[in-house]
Each structure stands twice: as C-alpha cells, then as structure tokens.
Image (cartoon, grey):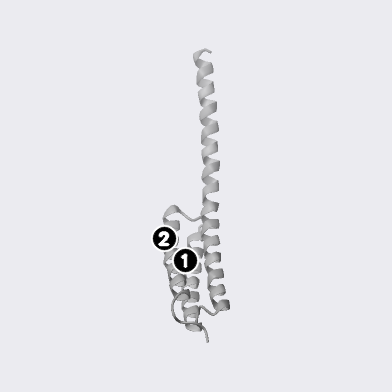
Amino acid sequence: MNISTKRLALIIAATVLSSAALMAQDTVTPKREAQVERRANRQQKRIHQGVKSGQLTPKETAHLEKREAKLDKDIAKAEADGKITKQEQSKLNKEENRNSRKIFHKKHNARTQK
C-alpha cells in the first residue's frame, strides 16, 4: 500500500465512522422522549391502580393528578423543539422521581378510600 492508498483508506474509514456517529446521535434523542413518556405512563397507571384498589383517597388522587399534569406540561415544553436534551431529561427525571415517591407514600399511608 502506498501513501495515497493509505490516505484514501483513512478518509473512507473516517467518513464511515462519522456517519455512524451521526446516525447514533439521531437515535439517542427519540430514546429520551420514549423513556420519559413510558415512565410518565407507568406512573399514571400506578395512580389508577391506587384508585381502583382504594389505596388513594379522592383528595390524594387529585393531588397526584395535578403533579402528573405539571409533568405532562413540562414534557411538552421540553419536546417543543423536537427533541429532549440531556439537561431537560435530567430535570424531567428528577420531577418523575419526586412524583414516584409521592405516589408510593400516598398509596402506602394509613388513609384509604371509604
């Protein structure tokens, strides 16, 4: 292999790697949206299960639904530009963590639906 052949091989390899990196970058963003949406849906199901089982009172349910509505609004705001950044995902994850803890505590306290 002479120098120009090596140079051509390096250029081709660099092009392939850079296009692979761009494709990988494009697939990261939809994963963020999907992860945030899946988690929000699971939490909503947990709330509905708590209502169905009687673990949540109407007042507790209203409070949790209000928190979930705020989360939905924040998700929509983060997705407004078409993608969720790592920083936005971090903020949403923290909010989802807080909501998850609230759901758990309200489902496992002494109050029940009458």
Q: Position of residue 106 (x, y in %)?
A: 45, 75
Specify whether 102 is left or right of 20. Answer: left
Q: Position of residue 43 (x, y in %)?
A: 52, 67
Instruction: Please tell me whether mark 2 sits on a helix, a strand or a loop.
Output: helix
Q: Judge by depth and name the residue closer to the eye, 84 or 3.
A: 84
Q: Decide: marks 1, 2 in contact (CB < 8 A)? A: yes
Query: Which amino acid, mark 2?
Result: Lys
How packed mark 1 is, by other alpha carbons closer than 10 Å (few <14, some 14-19, many 20 or more), is some
Disc on res. 91:
2
Compute the Cα span from label 1 to label 2. 9 Å
Comes first in the chain, label 1 or label 2: 1
Q: Judge by depth and name the residue closer to the eye, 55 or 60.
A: 55
Q: Position of residue 39 (x, y in %)?
A: 52, 62
**Total labels drawn:** 2
In the picture of the structure, the residue carrying the numbered disc 1 is: 74
Query: Which amino acid, mark 1?
Result: Asp
Q: Position of residue 108 (x, y in %)?
A: 46, 74
Q: Residue at x 44, y 53 (%)?
A: 86
How packed mark 2 is, by other alpha carbons closer than 10 Å (few <14, some 14-19, many 20 or more), is some
Q: Residue at x 51, y 78 (%)?
A: 55
Return the residue found at the far top: 2
Return the residue found at the far front: 110
22 w.r.t. 82: above or below: above
Q: Residue at x 55, y 32 (%)?
A: 16
Instruction: Residue 97: name its quadrant.
Output: bottom left
Viewer-side label of 1, 2: 2
Disc on res. 63:
none
Return the residue found at the far right: 52
Instruction: Please tell me whether mark 1 sits on a helix, a strand or a loop.
Output: helix
Q: Judge by depth and name the residue closer to the eye, 49 or 63.
A: 49
